[in-house]
Structure formats: structure tokens, C-alpha cells
Image (spheres, grey):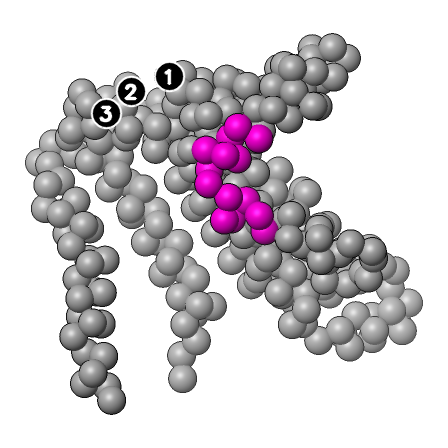
Amino acid sequence: MPALFAVPAAVAVAFLAVPLLGLLGRTPWGSIAAELATPRVLEALRLSLVCSLGAVAVSVVLGVPLAFLLARVEFPGRNLVRALTTLPMVLPPVVGGVALLLAFGRRGLAGQWLDQWFGITLPFTTAGAILAEAFVAMPFLVISTEAGLRAMDRRFEDAAATLGAGRWLTFRRVTLPLIAPSLFAGIALCWARALGEFGATITFAGNLPGVTQTMPLAVYIALETDLEAAIALSLVLLAISLVVLVALRDRWFPTA
């Protein structure tokens, strides 16, 4: 039986590996440092870090409580909430960007009130790019954290409560350390997804250099004008993805 799968498996590996080999083969190794040091590339790198870390912060602040409720609290419509939480994972990013524009644009469902009451305008701003990245990346953190909460042994929490610890103390000193691997895995996946976001960002926040032009957007623009810069930026994103994958290896592929 294994022999029957050898050929299609080899084709699958080649299908996944050849594009990466093509990228590595065309990388201008001799000038990559100079390409990455250009002001345009450095600005895209800086903005990508700012936006992706901002998206992670938003996801942690909102996503961890959501994961806790989904894992621990029975309430009407919980399955619907879980479905809505995971929807951005399968929603085309451009559609997500359009939805964000209709929700938080100046004439959007919530955006018009933000503009009238607080003077806050999100589209085509750095804050808008952070919001777009958080929208598509938060589900990864929520799912991972919820799985950790469901898998943990709740007897430790019961023991802490028996010893007189309050709910907040128990959460900080018992629950968080026990779910830390799942939480950190969710944060890593969330950050990697936010860092590579393209469709929702360009639709909702635009492609303004120094304001919303993150690395994926810079790659897209550089393909038309500076192929070596596009390859250099692509290599950075590939390296980051590889680091995240290696860091999460034991969680995805448990050793025997």
C-alpha cells in the first residue's frame, strides 16, 4: 500500500517545494543586504512590525476573553459566535476588506458614529491597517487558546479555589501558566498571519507608503518596478514563516 502513495506524494512535495526553490534560486544573495537597507524596504519592514504587533495586541485583548467564554460558558448562540469567530479564516481577504469598509468607513455602520462622535477615521490609516490585520488574524489565537482551555485539567483551578484563591488570582497564577503553550502558539500564528495579510489591508487601508504599505503590499508594487527588492522582501516573509513553523513543530507534529 505505501508504494501506491509514493508517486503522488512525491509529486505533492515537488509541487510545494519547487516554488520555494525558485524563490531561493532567484534571490540576489550578493545584493540582498543592500536591497533590504533601502529606505522603501526599511519603511515597509517597520510598518509591518508596527501593524502586525498592533494586530496581535488587539487580538490578545479581545480574543483571550472570547476564547474563555467559548470554552467555559454555556450561553445561547455559542455555536453561532464560534462560527462568526472562525469565519475570517475562510472568508476571501478582499471580501473581509470590503466588509470592514462598509462597517468602519466614514459612511459605514459603525464608522459614521466614530467619525461624528470622536472624529476617528480608520480607512487608509495605520490604525485601519492594524484593524484589518486583526480581523483576519484573531481567529487563529481564539481557536488555539480555546483548545488549550478545553484540554487543561480543571482540577488545578478547583484546588486553587479550595485554598482561597479568587477567580482573577486563579486565572493569573493557574489558568494562564497551564494554557501558555496554546496561547503562545496562537500568538505566533496570529502574528504570522497578520504579517502576511494583503487583501483586507489593501482594500480597507489602501497602499500608502509610510502609512499602510506593509511588506506584502510592497512586494506587490515592487514586482512591477524592482524585482530584486520584491524577492528580498519575499525572502524575509518566507524566513519568518519558517521560524514560526519550526517554533510550533512540537505542537503540530507530536513526536512519537
Q: Position of residue 44 (x, y in %)?
A: 35, 26
Q: Nearer the viewer, residue 2 or 175?
A: 2
Disc 1 and disc 3: Cα gap in Å? 12 Å
Disc 3 designates what residue?
A: 222
Q: Secondary structure at mark 2?
A: helix
Residue at 16% of width from left, 75% of height from top? 7
Describe residue 248's horizontal placement relative to residue 173 as left or right: left
Disc 1 and disc 2: Cα gap in Å? 8 Å
Q: Is residue 254 located in the magenta-colored stretch of the structure?
A: no
Quarter of the figure with residue 244: bottom left
- If the image is split into quadrants, where does the C terminus sit? bottom left
Describe residue 195's horizontal placement relative to residue 117 as left or right: left
- Vertical side of 253 occupied by 56: above or below: above
Tag 3 or tag 1, which sits nearer the N-term?
1
Dot 1 surroundings within 10 Å: few (below 14), some, or many (20 or more)?
A: some
Dot 2 surroundings within 10 Å: few (below 14), some, or many (20 or more)?
A: some
Disc 3 and disc 2: Cα gap in Å? 10 Å
Q: Amino acid at mark 2?
A: Arg
Residue stretch in magenta: 86-99
Residue at 23% of width from left, 79% of height from top? 5
- If the image is split into quadrants, where does the N terminus sit? bottom left
Q: Nearer the viewer, mark 3 or mark 2?
A: 3
- Vertical side of 18 occupied by 254: above or below: below
Q: Position of residue 113 (x, y in %)?
A: 74, 17
Disc 2 designates what residue?
A: 40
Q: Position of residue 249 (x, y in %)?
A: 40, 66
